[in-house]
Amino acid sequence: MFSINPIYSIFLFLIIEVLIYLAVIGMVLRRSAGQRWVTYLTALYALIALLVQSLNLAWQASLIPNIDFFILEQTYWYSSLLLAFLLILILRTFLQKEKSNLWGGIGIFFVIILALLPLNTFQLPDILWTDGTWMIPRERVAFGVVTIGWLIFTIGAFFTFRNTYKNTHQPLHRNRLLYWLPVFIFLFSADALFINNYPNWGAPFRLLGVWLLGYIVITHHLPDLQQISRNVSIYFSTTILASLFYLLGYSLAQQLLPATVESSPRLTGTIIALLLAMFFRPLLNFVESLIDRWLGIDKQNVSQTVNEYSQSISNILDMERLANVTVSLIMEVMGIQRGFLFLVDKEKREARNYYALRAVRNAGERPISAIWLDEEGPIAEYLTKEQRPLLQFDLDLLPLFKHSHPEERNWLNRLNAEVYVPIFAKREWIGLFALGGKISGNRYSKEDLLTLSALAGQTAVALENARLVENLIDLNNQVRDAYRDLENTKRDLEKIDRTKSDFISIASHELRTPLTVMRGYTEMLLENPSLDKMTLKMLTGIHEGTLRLHEIMDSLFDIAQIDARTLELEFEPIDVGALIQEVSLGLTQTIKGRKQSLKLDLPPLPGIQADPNTLRKVFYHLISNAIKFTPNKGRIIVRGKTLPFSNKAMPEGGLEIIVSDTGIGIDPSFKEVIFTKFYQPDKELNKHSTGKTKFKGSGVGLGLALSRGIVEAHGGKIWVESPGHDEVSFPGSHFHVTLPLRKQTKGSTLPISEAIQLVI
């Protein structure tokens, strides 16, 4: 008969153990990111266990025959004590316990005691105790010290595990801790067997314990033990029930139809198997529901849940009601203790982008302070990039979140939530569900997280609609407030305008009389031939200033009449071309002083009914402005044309006068503003109102306002066209004035003027 040499068996076991231990060491060291110390300690534990087991197998294979058995036995003792010490350090590091100095001190204490015993420092006798049959030699003191130390470390590890589990309420953390129970069972059993000199029995336990320890250390999301228990229970329960069904069915067939069973056993078995197959699915459903009820596991119909949820929130547009309904439905359907809905807005603070999270709460509920998550922080980056639920378990343990801002972590911890479900609409993060633990105490399964993601997707549409409605309401309120403010401002402006008009009217009336007196007396004094040159020069200056004031007062008086709609026009037949020529000739000295050219290009124009005094002011202001805002050596052109009748404004036709220049131009956004009272076109202009002919010299800002009032009082229209304002290329401006023709009395006609071609 073939037999295997025991040496070969030992070598085979040695190779298998070496490969397994080395695989564990490589596995934990390769995944040490964020868990460096616990993986290093685990690798050291596996290495020491490998060396001890290799020593044991090598001794059994007689590879080291010279080693004394007592030394080998002491190796078992000391290694078990050392491994127990390492195990409690691994456990405390794994649980992130900061204070382990006490256990380090206890370990050093036992190292010192065991180091001093061989030297007989304590002066112990060779035989500590004997009854004649049994005795305790001094060499066995080390065994007692090791046993005491091993018990201390073992009990310490167990109570550390027990207290941590008792104070941990999150199911994922508790599930992670429960995996340590089989580790304790395997490793403590192995230590006990090694200490009592049963290494071959203890080796398999230690091997299993080390492998499971390495798996726990490197695996973040450990399989759900409750789910494993469920699957195992269902498997064994259905197997046992199926076997019982088959046995009972076969026994019953033997009782009722013994001849048939005896003659055709295969047929009988086939029929029973078919019956079992027919009833197996209902039997499996029954077993699953029974075990789920026993373990407290709630099963949900995801499609039905999502459909009902969508129908419940689809028509809600109020933000507070939407928050209440969504959170309440999720809590009810999934059996959750608490929940919150946060709105997410992107904001910029201190040159960095943040996500502002603001809770949607009812007026009577406790408010939750807002938080700003850094866009580049690990928490916001995970939620925006992954777009899937984030577990508090991951926040607590994953190295990725260790560098997140403490304020963000503390704020999330205060919510006492277990999962954070982001809500996205059009790839934009707009909301967040913060949900607490389940009432049953179970963990969130993968199916639960998928369901929550689906519900968040359904919420996104309703949330976006509610936010749009909320923004629309805010916008309407802002528009209403702005309209109310605008009405108040309009009334204030009308009041100010009335006050200004009243002031202009009063000032023009009250100042005209003294100015007329001053003008008259100065003119009388100027006619006196006996005045010396200095006095004459002073009187001339006074006279020019008086004329300027008189001109301003006339403009103010006309503006006051226009504002009060009391401007009285004395219509008479006039020749517009001749009137423009008269105004232009009056400005000859000014034009020559600026080295400019003024060209009149007026075709024969029909005579019109108009007030010559006021119309003369219009063309005076237009040509004066053209001179003022055109640089030296610039050109001014006055053109005219006849307009046919076209609309209700000019039923008899009309004429159009265009005053063009090569000046600085006008910004298109100011084409209407320049026709308002007291408008100053540029803050850089000369503020002296006497600068009537200076380049860009300023005035009181009444010329164009007065011109528009006069033209419109004649039934015409005035406007300006310009490419823009530019003091380098000088694009120029074109002022247009249209005046209507009026129907004459029967038999009366107005002559056509002569063409005027003149260059000044």
Image: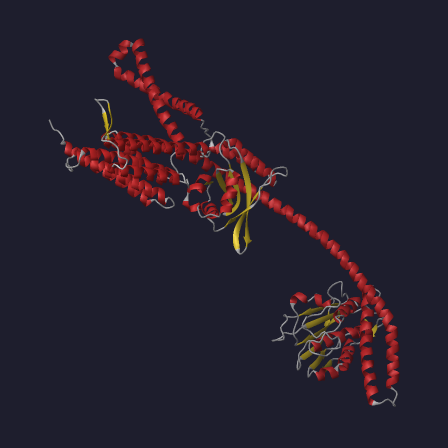
Q: Is residue 201 above or below residue 680?
A: above
Report whether 119 appears left or right of 289. Answer: left
The answer to whether residue 210 of the structure is visible from this angle is no
* Lateral position of residue 326 relative to residue 483, left or right: left
- Identify the image quadrant of the N terminus: top left
Residue furthest left in the image: 1
Q: Does residue 627 show up?
A: yes
Q: Position of residue 744 (x, y in %)?
A: 83, 69
**In this figure, what is the number of numbered marks?**
0
Point out residue 638 in the picture as x, y percentages from the top left corner.
Answer: 71, 77
* Closer to us: 669 or 160: 160
Vertically, is 604 above or below 436?
A: below
Please give left or right for residue 334 compared with residue 655 in the image: left
**Percent coordinates x, y for residue 235 in the rendering:** 35, 25
Q: Residue at x 45, y 26 (%)?
A: 296
The image shows residue 137 at horizontal and vertical percentages of 23, 29
Between residue 275 and residue 21, name the one nearer to us: 21
- Between 429 and 78, the one lying in front of the other is 78
Instruction: Identify which residue is drawn at 32% across, 35% down.
Output: 84
The image quarter in which residue 175 lies: top left
The quadrant of the picture occupied by the C terminus is bottom right
* Color style of the picture: secondary structure
In the rendered view, does 737 fall on the left or right side of 415? right
Q: Nearer the viewer, residue 608 or 551?
A: 551
